[in-house]
Image (tube, rainbow, N blue to C red):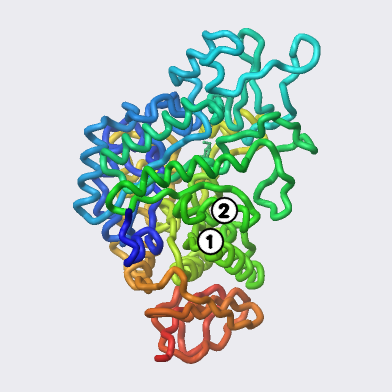
Amino acid sequence: MPDQSTPPWWRTAVFYEIYVRSFADSTGDGVGDLRGIHDHLDHLVTLGVDALWLTPFYPSPMADHGYDVSDPRGVDPMFGTMQDFDDLLAAAHDRGLRVTVDIVPNHFSSAHPWFLAALDATPGSPERDRFIFRDGRGPDGVEPPTNWLSTFGGPAWTRAPDGQWYLHLFTPEQPDLNWRNPDVGDDMEATLRFWLDRGVDGFRIDVAHGLFKAVDLPDNPAGLAPDLMSETAEPTGMWNQPEVHDVYRRWRRVLDERPGEPVLVGEVWIGDAAEQARYVRPDELHLVFNFRLLFSAWEPSEMSQAIDRSTHELRAVGAASTWVLSNHDVVRHTTRYGGGAAGLRKARAALLLILALPGAVFLYEGEELGLEEVELPDAALQDPIWESSGHTVRGRDGCRVPMPWSGDRPPYGFTPGERSWLPQPLDWAELTVAAESRDRTSMLGFYREALARRPRTLDPDAPLTWNRRDSVLDVTVTGAPGVRCVVNLGAEPVALPPGDLLLTSDPVTGRMLPSDTTAWLALPPA
Ligand code: NOJ
C-alpha cells in the first residue's frame, strides 16, 4: 500500500499532454514519434512540468489517430519500437519526469484480432459477445437496433456483412467492447500490468464514463446523443452506467500494489459535478479531468462557480481537483479567448489562475508557445469527424498542428522531412521554441517563470475564500505558503488589495491591476 503520510505526487503535479503525432518527428515521415519526444525532453524539463501524458502510440490503423487500438500492448511502427518506448521512459525518469500513458478501454480498433474473429464468427458466438452485436429492427432488420447516435455524427451502429449490427459510440472503426464479457476486463487488466511492468507512472483513461451500456440498450428519449456536460442531462443507456465503478475499483487495486504511486486519471465528460466525483471515491480513480473552467465564459460569477462547484464535490469524496484549459479535442484557449493579443493576454491570466488553485494542472503541448487554433484548408483536414459529419463539422485538427521548434518556415524543425502531417502556418517563425527561448518576454518565458514560481507546497485541500468584487475574480488560497490570486476580468483597471506582489501575468504599474491581468499576492503572516 502507498505511504499515507506524505501527499502523493499527482495531487499537485503539473502534467503536460503530448499529442504524439504532433510533438516532434525523428524520422522524416512528417508524423511525431517516441524518439522525437526523447530528443526534446529538455524542453519539458526547462518548462518545469512534473509529468507527461502520452496519447496512444499503440498499433492502430489510425482511423481516429490512434484512439482505435489494434494491439494495446505494442508500439505502432509509425511511432517507433518498444525499445524506443523503454529508452524514452528511462530518459524521462533520469530527468525527474514521470510518464503516464493513455488506455482506451471503451473500444478497440475494428482491426483488432478479436473484432476480426467476431466478424468471422456467427451471431450468438463467444467471439461476438466481446463486442455489442445485435439484430436490427424493422423488416429484415434493416433499421439499427437503437436510435443512438455516434459522438462523431451518424448512427452509432454499423451493419456487419451477415446483417447483424455492431455498436460504435465513435467511428465505425472503433467497435465498443462488451464489458459484461469477463474476457474484456481480464484483457484490460493485462494491459495495465504490461505497461506498469515497463515502469509507467500511470494512465489517462479514455472515455472513462463509457465502457458499460445499459443491459436492455434503451432508446434515447430525444433520439439525440445526450449532452452529458449539461448539469441537467437526462440519464442515458450509453454512458455512465453504475457497473463502471467496479472496473475502477479493480484497477485501483492493481495500481495500489505498485511502488511509486502510479496514477489513474479519468476522462469523464459529465457536467454534474457530484456524479463526476463518484469516479474519484477513495477506492476508484485518483483524478478526473475537470472541464468546468474550460467551458466557462470569461466572467467572474461563472468562473468562481465552476471552481467552487468542482472543488466542493471533489473534496467531499477526498479527491484533489484538476485544472485544464486545452487538450487535443478542443479549440485552443488562446482562440477561445478571442485570439490575437487579447487572447494571449487572457491565456496568461488564466494560467496564473489555475496555477494558484489547489490540485493538479494539465497543460497541452504548444500552449506554452501561445499557439492558436489553426484554420486549415478543407483538403488538409484529417479528423474523422469531418467525414462522418458529411463535411459540416471541421473537427479537431486545428489544435493538433505540429509543434514549431526552430527556423523561420515550415516545418520549423518539427521533422527532418519536408512537411508535417498537418500543414503549419507560415507566420509561426516567432512562435518556435528556439525563438521564444531567446525572448524572456515571450509566452514561453512567462510559462517557465510561472511554473517555477507556482506555490509548490499548495495543499490540495487548502480552503478557498472569495473576496467578491464586480468584474474581479479574487480568491485567497489559505495554506502553506498560500496565495491571493486576483484576476481582473473587466475592462477597467482595478485597485489591488494589500500584499506583496509575487507575479503578474502582464506588467503592473503602481497598485492598479489592468484589464485581463492576474496578480499573485503574498498573504500576510497569520
Ligand atoms: C477521447 C479522446 O480524447 C478523443 O481524441 C477520441 O477521439 C475519443 N476519446 C475516442 O477514443
Measured as percent of width and height from the top left, residue 453 is found at: 34, 73
**91 relative to 473 in the view: left or right:** left
Which of the numbered marks, if any, corresponds to residue 317?
Answer: 1
136 with respect to 28 (left or right): right
Disc 2, SS: helix
Name of the residue lying farthest toward the front:
1
Q: Which of marks 1 and 2 is nearer the N terminus?
A: 2
> Mark 1 falls on what kind of element?
loop
Classed neighbour count for the residue bearing mark 1: other residues with Cα under 10 Å, few (<14), some (14–19), many (≥20): some
Which percent across, then down, holds residue 327?
Answer: 49, 49
Few, some or many residues within 10 Å of mark 2 (<14, 14–19, 20+): some
Check if mark 1's residue and mark 2's residue have beta carbons within 8 Å: yes
The front one of 324 and 100 is: 100
Residue at label 2? 278
Across and down, in percent, residue 518 comes to 50, 75
Residue 31, above or below 54: above
Q: Where is residue 152 drawn, in percent x and y?
A: 62, 34
Q: Which residue is drawn at 56% across and 56% down?
A: 277
Is 229 above or below relative to 162? below
Q: What residue type is labelled 1?
A: Val
Observer-nearest of 411 and 37:
37
Tell me the CA gap for discs 1 and 2: 8 Å
Q: Which quadrant is home to the C terminus?
A: bottom left
- Number of the label disc, if any, that sits on residue 163: none
Name the one closer to the observer, 461 or 375. Answer: 461
Can I make out residue 276 in this image?
yes
Looking at the rendering, which quadrant does residue 520 occupy? bottom left
Disc tally is 2
Image quadrant of residue 169? Answer: top right
Identify the residue at horizontal 43%, vertical 52% (top origin): 364
